[in-house]
Image (cartoon, coloured by chain):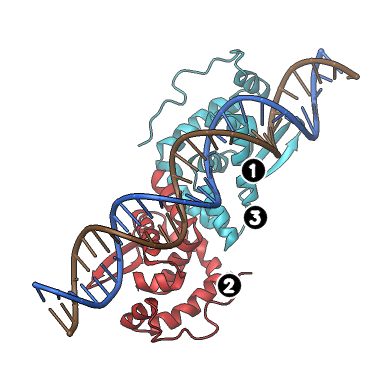
Chain colours: A cyan, B red, C blue, D brown
Amino acid sequence: MDDTISKLKALADKNRLRIFCALVRHEELCACQITELLQVTGATASRHLSILVAAGLLKSRKDGRWVLFSLDRSGNGFDGILQWLDPELRISLTLQNDLDALVRITGLSREDLCRQQRGEACCPIPKGAHTKKES
Amino acid sequence: MDDTISKLKALADKNRLRIFCALVRHEELCACQITELLQVTGATASRHLSILVAAGLLKSRKDGRWVLFSLDRSGNGFDGILQWLDPELRISLTLQNDLDALVRITGLSREDLCRQQRGEACCPIPKGAHTKKES
DNA sequence: TAAACATTTAGTTGTTTGGCTAATTATAAA
DNA sequence: TTTATAATTAGCCAAACAACTAAATGTTTA
């Protein structure tokens, strides 16, 4: 039961649910892409990611300097979770907006993305991104 | 999305998950039966129940002095939730123990149960109930 | 009507959680 | 080998939460 509660707790947070749903549609995302998506500090994104990994919902692998995260579909009841959350993916404006934002984020090279996050303004954020309101 | 997060948060608590799973197997339970099951104060059980109702996972109806709770199966994605949690019901010792305890609890009249909770010791708790350990 | 009683609401307290900044670790580039 | 950098960890604070006791609410019975 503790295992199930860990998964529920892990998903019962807006930012972590956004991460999870983003990874339903994108095979792999690195920590800095998640950071950019959520618009929080890298430390905060890292904490959320570690909670999702600890709950057995995500797995990660290193790729040089980067750490890439993806869904861990091997967990108990994973299909039930997806079946539950899938309708959500289609109707939530927040999640739709995230998918739009991910088109931009994954379109940048990881180098440019991280440079941008450090405020060197080499890659201005296109107007309209991150501006839709939740229904 | 907020609706989904409410449901996840509501289930992401050990006592509330126990309530929910108890109601998967028992059509209706009153607040005092839940109180007896969880071994918490009536106020605490009432709060947990209200959170589950607010999340749309349970519904309630009044029957005289008593309030009876049951699953609200009309909610979005309810089947996915059940599909996810059903395996849990079979393997968790805590939940199995709860089902055993419910046999005793539902075997008592509501009157006797509530009298017992007030400590008049009219209905001694059978030895062995509430004693199994979680795996 | 008065007393008993099932449940809920209010108010308090200690714990958990989510965010931040700063410091640390590990990898890559100069 | 020094510097830059992606990610994590540590430490802090405010907000959220779960438990309790006590008081309030609404229903039934004497």
Amino acid type, residue under disc 1 in the picture? Ser
What residue is at 57 percent from the left and 63 percent from the top? A1
What residue is at 59 percent from the left and 28 percent from the top? A106
Could you say which is closer to the camera, residue A83 or residue A57?
A57
Q: Quadrant of the N terminus of chain B?
A: top left
Label 3, secondary structure: give it: loop
Residue D6 x/y as whole percent:
69, 28
Q: In this view, does B22 lie to the left or right of A26?
A: left
Residue B116 x/y as whole percent:
38, 80
Q: Which chain carries label 3?
A: A
Amino acid type, residue under disc 3 in the picture? Ser
Residue indicated by mark 3: A74
- Residue count near mark 1 (Cα–Cα under 10 Å), binned few <14, some 14–19, many ≥20: some
Callouts 3 and 1 close, C-beta under 8 Å: no
Q: Which chain carries label 1?
A: A
Residue A56 x/y as whole percent:
63, 52
Q: Is residue B115 left or right of residue B80?
A: left
Along the polypeptide, which appears first: circle 3 or circle 1?
1
Q: Which chain carries label 2?
A: B
Q: In this view, does A109 lie to the left or right of A78?
A: right
Residue B34 x/y as whole percent:
40, 70
- Residue count near mark 2 (Cα–Cα under 10 Å), binned few <14, some 14–19, many ≥20: some
Q: In which quarter of the image is residue D24?
A: bottom left
Q: How far apart are marks 3 and 1 (CA)?
A: 17 Å
Q: Distance between the residues labelled 1 and 2?
A: 28 Å
Q: In this view, does B133 lie above or below A103?
A: below
Using the image, tell me which numbered label, if any, was put on residue A50. 1
Q: In this view, does A11 lie above or below B25?
A: above
Q: In this view, does B131 lie above or below A94?
A: below
Residue indicated by mark 2: B93
